[in-house]
Amino acid sequence: MGTDDFGGGGGEGGGPPRKKRRVLRWFTVCLSLLILATAGAGYFYIEHLNGNLSKDILNLGDSKLDKSNPNAAGQTPMNILLLGSDSRQSKSNVELGGAKGDSGRPPLADVQMLLHVSADRSNMSVISVPRDTKATIPKCTDPDDKKVYDETTDKINTSLQHGGPGCTVATWEELTGIPVDHFMMIDFSGVVSMADAVGGVPVCVNNNVYDPQSKLRLKKGNSVVRGEQALHWLRTRHGFGDGSDIGRARAQHLYMNSMVRQLKAGTKLTDPGKMRGLAEAATKALTVDEGLGSVKKLYDLGNDLKRVPTKRITMVTMPWQYAPGGYVVPKNGDADHTFSLIRNDVALDGKDKKKAHAKKPEPTEPTQPRSEIPVRVMNGTGSALQPPVSGRAGVVSEQLGRKGFAQTTADQTPKSQADTTISYQRRDQRGNALAVARAIGLPENAVKHSSGVQGVTLVVGGDWREGTSYPKGAGRSGGEQENKAPDSADALRGDDDKACMEVNPSYVW
């Protein structure tokens, strides 16, 4: 089936490596495209480049999570799923990726990273999920031939074969509970041109390394990789760490961070001919959702991303553990804690500043008696795999009524979100919202100030599918000391220019 296209999961139960089938599908190209290629392409034939872009439907699942609410200032976080396809549907991709026998095989999404940009654009978090992660792939319908792919359990990289990137988006929403706003998918083409265009990317290894499978050969210390050498760096699995896909994810994080530092330091393209070629290669290699389906939209997105300081970019790998059958699975506690931080727009670096109101402390007490506080309750328990629990809004509304909130109403508008939240529209309503939270046992960090709601609004999420009191320890991140990525996420900061890859001792020369 081709799921071991990188040579297996690299851990217990992983299959043997397959030569010529380890190809980079990497996030760096996507970010480079946003910041570099689209900016230069704006001076050339925009309509022609727009025609190069492939577009696809964002989400092919039957049920989709609702988008994130805006914060008090009307700013909304953004989540972009970045996919690397091992498609060999073109001659250039076959030449770069090898494995000519796979030229007709449906592609796999062997690199998957979610880029989360905070609502205020002060920080960015990127989380990789290993390609061998065991996932429930929801029912998806191919938009082209209308073929229906039934729900199944498999490695997450195979989700791309269930109708396209929109099924991978649906799988991610189910796995993480994070609503996905856009996707960008890249194949092999344009990778070498991108690396050359920025003048090479500095990388570091802690020992001499030679990986004959990827052809990476570097001396101990710092090097600048260009062209195909950059591709070798990003392909390498065996040469780093324990030889698994986990080490390669960190190598890709290191490379991307280094490239971002290069770009922010003033790296520019000055040769119009090279710029034209780069724009051609990049746009032909890219598939995006319809909401990002033009160079202008990509350019605007790139400008938005450039607002984030390098030191506030944090890259992590989903906390994981090995499982039978060549799988890895999310690590209990740590994985959902990481997902929860992103769902709640909390920076993974732990450096979010508390919202300060020096002259006006945050209200903590209600401004009205319970009987006069209007509360709207909505049922958000549905997900890609689970139907909504019928009547949840009514059950919780009745419980609030018994607690004295006589103005509570159940809103039947369909919703879908992972976490139960209470949102309030105006700052002076915070005390009222906290009173509602206390009445049902919901923690304070579930109370949000949002310009996107009216009054006090309670959404019963997928974490509360039964009962009249919010279950303790339902997976929500809590406690100031916990508001950062766990150690098991292997975080790498964007401004860490001292990071060095640990070479697998079996590949030292």
Image (cartoon, helix red, strand yellow):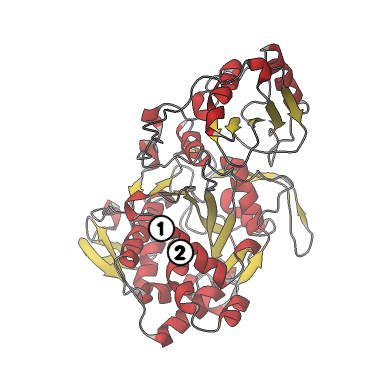
Q: State the image coordinates of residue 189 (x, y, percent, origin top left).
A: 50, 74
Q: State the image coordinates of residue 413 (x, y, percent, origin top left).
A: 76, 37
Q: Is residue 372 above or below residue 105?
A: above
Q: State the image coordinates of residue 412 (x, y, percent, origin top left).
A: 78, 33
Q: Which residue is mark 2?
A: 303
- Could you tell me if the residues under marks 1 and 2 are in contact, i.e. CB atoms within 8 Å? yes
- Residue 450 lies in what quarter of the image? top right
Total marks drawn? 2
* Residue drawn at 55 percent across, 46 percent down: 74
Q: Kindly tell me whether residue 490 is visible in this rendering.
A: yes
Q: Assess disc 2: are there few (<14), some (14-19) or many (≥20) residues with their C-alpha within 10 Å of its C-alpha.
A: some
Q: Is residue 434 above or below residue 414?
A: above
> Relative to the observer, which residue lies in front, 403 or 442?
403
Q: Which residue is mark 1?
A: 307
- Residue 68 lies in what quarter of the image? top right
Q: Quadrant of the C terminus?
A: bottom left
Q: Which mark is residue 352?
A: none
Q: Is residue 98 above or below residue 379?
A: below
Q: Which residue appears farthest toward the front when viewing the image?
A: 359
Q: Secondary structure at mark 1?
A: loop
Q: Assess disc 1: are there few (<14), some (14-19) or many (≥20) residues with their C-alpha within 10 Å of its C-alpha.
A: few
Q: Kindly tell me whether residue 212 is visible in this rendering.
A: no
Q: Of the residues shown, which amino acid type is indicated by label 2?
A: Asn
Q: Is residue 190 above or below residue 305?
A: below
Q: Of the residues shown, which amino acid type is indicated by label 1?
A: Arg
Distance Cα–Cα, label 1 vs label 2 = 7 Å
Q: Secondary structure at mark 2?
A: helix
In this rendering, position of residue 190 left or right of residue 160: left
> Relative to the observer, which residue lies in front, 360 or 435?
360
* Residue drawn at 35 percent across, 64 percent down: 259
> Relative to the observer, which residue lies in front, 435 or 131?
435
